[in-house]
């Protein structure tokens, strides 16, 4: 059963947005983004003229679906909200690899996974790392 976000959004302890207000959404990851779509839809029902200049996520996992679409690109196309990541999966893996902490079977598993499910930049990283 999907979570009912209205009780969280309507809590008296939280800020209540008003028409014309700009809200930046913040979350940990975007895969595939269903909760973010629900949050946008709920806020738009509660405050019809609310604007969302951006979604900021901690990590872009750089995964693509069967059609090659990544979650961030799909979210932006469907909502008009730009997505900005603090770091990408390849940023993290590149750092671990350069510092010698991504080795052996785990390193190979990451390369194989990104070759199969990664976005174009993730696949490029995987090819260069192979």
Image (tube, rainbow, N blue to C red):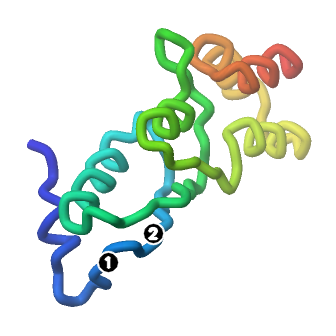
The answer to whether residue 119 is above or below residue 38 is above
Q: Which mark is residue 17?
A: 1
Q: Is residue 123 left or right of residue 68?
A: right
Q: Is residue 117 left or right of residue 25?
A: right
Look at the image and tell me in which quarter the N terminus lies: top left
Q: How far, Cα to Cα, is label 1 from label 2?
A: 8 Å
Whichever of callouts 1 and 2 sits on the residue coming sooner in the sequence is: 1
Mark 1: give few (<14), some (14-19) or many (20+) Cα within 10 Å.
Answer: some
- The residue positioned 66% from the left and 14% from the top of the image is 112
Mark 2: give few (<14), some (14-19) or many (20+) Cα within 10 Å.
Answer: some
The secondary structure type at the circle numbered 1 is loop
- The residue positioned 56% from the left and 14% from the top of the image is 68
The answer to whether residue 92 is above or below residue 16 is above
The answer to whether residue 86 is above or below residue 64 is below
Q: Which mark is residue 23?
A: 2
- The residue positioned 69% from the left and 43% from the top of the image is 88
Q: Position of residue 126 (x, y in %)?
A: 77, 20
């Amino acid at each position: 059963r999907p979570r009912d976000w209205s009780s969280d959004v309507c809590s008296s302890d939280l800020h209540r947005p008003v028409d014309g207000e700009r809200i930046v959404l913040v979350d940990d990851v975007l895969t595939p983004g269903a909760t973010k779509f629900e949050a946008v839809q709920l806020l738009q029902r509660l405050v019809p003229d609310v604007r969302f200049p951006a979604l900021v996520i901690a990590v872009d996992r750089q995964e693509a679906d069967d059609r090659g679409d990544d979650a961030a690109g799909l979210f932006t196309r469907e909502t008009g909200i730009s997505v900005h990541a603090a770091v990408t999966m390849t940023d993290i893996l590149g750092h671990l690899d350069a510092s010698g902490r991504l080795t052996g079977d785990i390193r190979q598993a990451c390369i194989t996974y990104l070759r199969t499910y990664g976005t174009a930049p993730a696949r490029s990283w995987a090819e260069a790392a192979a």
